[in-house]
Image: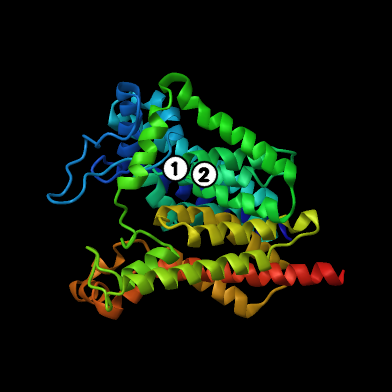
Amino acid sequence: MSINHRRYRSLINITCGVLSIAALCWIARLLTTNVSDIGFQWQAARNLARYGEPYHIQAWLHPIAGAPPPVYVYPPLFAWLFQPLAMFSLVRAQYIWFAINVLLLWIYMRLCWKHNASQLLGIWWGPAILVCTLASPTSVTLQLGQVSLLLACLVTLGAMPGVGLRGGMWAVGAAMKLFPGWLFGWSLLRRQWHVLGVGVGVGLCSSLLPLLGYGTLPYRAFLQVLKLAHYPYAAQFNVSIWGFWQRLLTHHDYGIAPLIQPQIAQILGGLSILAVVGLTVWSTPRGRQEEEGAGLSVWISGMLLLVPSNGFYNLVMLIWPLCWCIRRLEMKPQQGLIRYLLLSTLLCWIPPGWEALHPALNNFTHRGWGLLVLVPSFYGLLGIFVVCVVLSRQSMQSASRG
């Protein structure tokens, strides 16, 4: 490569890096407690300190008349960890958490790049960082103050080499939001008993932390919340298989379903979940260490499909599977899969509320079979999962022949 080409590439990388910083500053300027989920964590942490459990009604919100009051529906651990930020005002805590999330985003991207070792991403790191920063799931995560980037880092650190690290990181994630515990199925399938053992130990220890200061009350209250809380599974932000069938076949407040068949919705939802689990197990490498990237990519994308309440912001976790897919397609280019992966990624960029661009579009996508196109990101997630399954199977076949 000539010196001019190197300078040109460096200029593009640096320019994109500066634009990424500018984009983060712009998102910071848009922060407001009126459009934020951090208030739930902040109020839950204050409730834990004041009442001994984090599940009181969120006093900072004004619920819609006739609707159930919003509640914190996650295990107590994160409310316990969030208590230092709860000592500040909600506005200041929001900016501190935003800065932490920016750091977590950089760590997460660094881990994905390093572990998957893509030549393309290594050469054009600036545009890659800019794309990841501007991606709708990333910007929504940062603006809402969600914990998706923290979970993404824990999930990714769990894939790094090292005895027991994987089980510990996944256990902490599961103690915060339950669904990362799905990844232990991968270790069980591969008979990695030390990972399971360390995961159980770390999970118990991390879950015991709130007990030290508050006894069993936080967990008793959590079990009660699970029984009584109403979760809007059919809402547009829920990018999951369960949410897909709930939108189409049940009565809800987010549109007019073409058919009202809740029992059929449960049957189809259950069958779809079994299909994803089956494909995940079928495409999980059992052998060589270097194939673990394939397994994790399939299990992460499958996890996001399976969790009943998968918020759009959780799609930031797809950076790992996308990096792995790019590396595999560099090694063996396949034009059909490249186009399919690109289309799926673009669909994942379409955020909830996109249909509000035009009244006629809004009316169409909330009525009858128009609900099929209300959540394009669901099809994007499904497409990335399929690509991961196909590439993982190809990787397994190549390993068996080699």
Q: Are the residues tagged 2 and 1 within 8 Å (C-beta)?
A: yes
Residue at 39% across / 25% down in the picture? 83
Q: What element carries label 2?
A: helix
Q: Is 196 displayed left or right of 108 in the figure?
A: right
Q: In this view, does 251 lie above or below 207?
A: below
- Position in image of residue 242 (x %, y %): 41, 64
Q: Which residue lies furthest to the right in this view?
A: 402
Depth check: give the residue in front, 215 or 96.
Answer: 215
Q: Is mark 1 on a helix, strand or loop?
A: loop
Q: In this view, does 314 lie above or below 378?
A: above
The quadrant in which residue 252 appears is: bottom left
Is residue 12 in view? no
Residue at 60% across / 53% down in the picture? 125
Q: Is 124 displayed left or right of 3 in the figure?
A: left
- Position in image of residue 323 (x %, y %): 62, 58
- Position in image of residue 248 (x %, y %): 32, 73
Depth check: give the residue in front, 183 or 91.
Answer: 183
The quadrant in which residue 195 appears is: top right
Structural distance between the alpha carbons of marks 2 and 1: 6 Å
Label 1: how many residues lie within 10 Å, few (<14), some (14-19) or many (20+)? many
The quadrant in which residue 232 appears is: bottom left
State the mark number for residue 147. Answer: 1
State the mark number for residue 306. Answer: none
Label 2: how many residues lie within 10 Å, few (<14), some (14-19) or many (20+)? many
* Disc 2 residue type (three-letter): Leu
* Image quarter of the C terminus: bottom right
Residue at 35% across / 74% down in the picture? 373
* Residue hosting label 2: 151
